[in-house]
Image: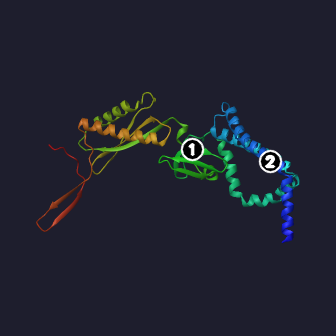
Amino acid sequence: MEKILDKLELWKDIFIKNIPNITIALVVLIVAYFSSRYMSNLVNRAIGGKIKQKSVRNLVSRIASAVIFLLGLYFAMTILKFDDTLKTIVSAAGVSGIVVGLALQGTLSNTISGVVLSFRKNLNIGNWVETNDYAGEVIDINLNYFVIKEADNNMVVIPNKMILESPFKNYSLTTKMRIAIECGVEYGADLEKVEKLTKETITNNFNQKKLEKEVEFYYTEFGDSSINFLCRFWVDSENALEKLKAKSNAIVKIKQAFDAAGINIPFPMRTLEFVDDNKLNIKEIAKQKVSAN
């Protein structure tokens, strides 16, 4: 017990003796912390006009911030006279680096992948992408993971390695998207009139002339209750949500145009035949919708 008390007394004397150094070291760490944050913002603004990719700007600013903080940490350890300890750590890092590298192989792979992704010109923060069965807006690309904000406002965090090794679809690389709508009309309809009306409806509501595109219209098959067709057209869009809204609007406009022109869109119906009082014969038939007349 006396040895423990003597040791504690010795540590107390050392602590009191080094209070000025500890105070200076803490001040250096605090200054280094705020300086690193300021340096991050400064670098981001300085290279903002030269580097358009936000992911690259973020990467460079984070590296600059880390360098400033590490320098502050080094000065703080020097003030506390931990030079020998620091040299020992650096020397041991070379020996243990291989072991740590093997243990952190997945993490290092994600870090390298994050650097590669940051410099890719076809992928940037703010783009709407689809990859690994997820689709959404790219929120962040850092050294460990890739963050996507889905349409339902959920955040998806994906390791960088998976993004780099998997195909992805970037909707933001082009400003135009093609939409395909499948529909059917009754067998008694005037097919030429249907085609003309559909093309006019799409052209008038989605300005195909401005996009320098033409509406495509093709009859595809004789269905059970209708003659089916495929209509394809282009819209100004950079993400899947805008495409979905445009498709919904097109369906509404086509339906309104068909109703105004008296063109029916048939649908399968079930007919029940009562043979007698005790038996019921059910037939599944495809019957066209007819008017009340």
Q: Check disc 1 and give the amino acid type.
A: Val
Residue found 75% across the figure and 58% down from its top: 101
Task: State the residue position of label 2.
Answer: 23
- State how far apart marks 1 and 2 are (Cα): 43 Å
In this view of the protein, which residue sits in the foreground, 163 or 39? Answer: 39
In this view of the protein, which residue sits in the foreground, 288 or 111? Answer: 111
Left or right of 280 in this view: 219: right
Find numbered disc 1 in the image and state the secondary structure of the residue it sits on: strand
Find numbered disc 2 in the image and state the secondary structure of the residue it sits on: helix
Q: Check disc 2 and give the amino acid type.
A: Thr
Instruction: Please state the total of marks drawn on the protein image.
Output: 2
Quarter of the figure with the N terminus: bottom right
Compared to residue 260, the image places residue 69 above or below, namely below
Residue found 47% across the figure and 38% down from its top: 177
Left or right of 242 in this view: 105: right
Compared to residue 174, the image places residue 158 above or below, namely below
Left or right of 161 in this view: 24: right
In this view of the protein, which residue sits in the foreground, 205 or 274? Answer: 205
Extreme bottom residue here?
Answer: 1
Instruction: Examine the rendering and report whether any part of residue 86 can be seen.
Output: no
Residue found 23% across the figure and 38% down from its top: 262
Task: State the residue position of label 1.
Answer: 138
Residue found 81% across the figure and 45% down from its top: 24
Please state the horizontal and vertical placement of residue 44, each as a whole percent of the image: 68, 36
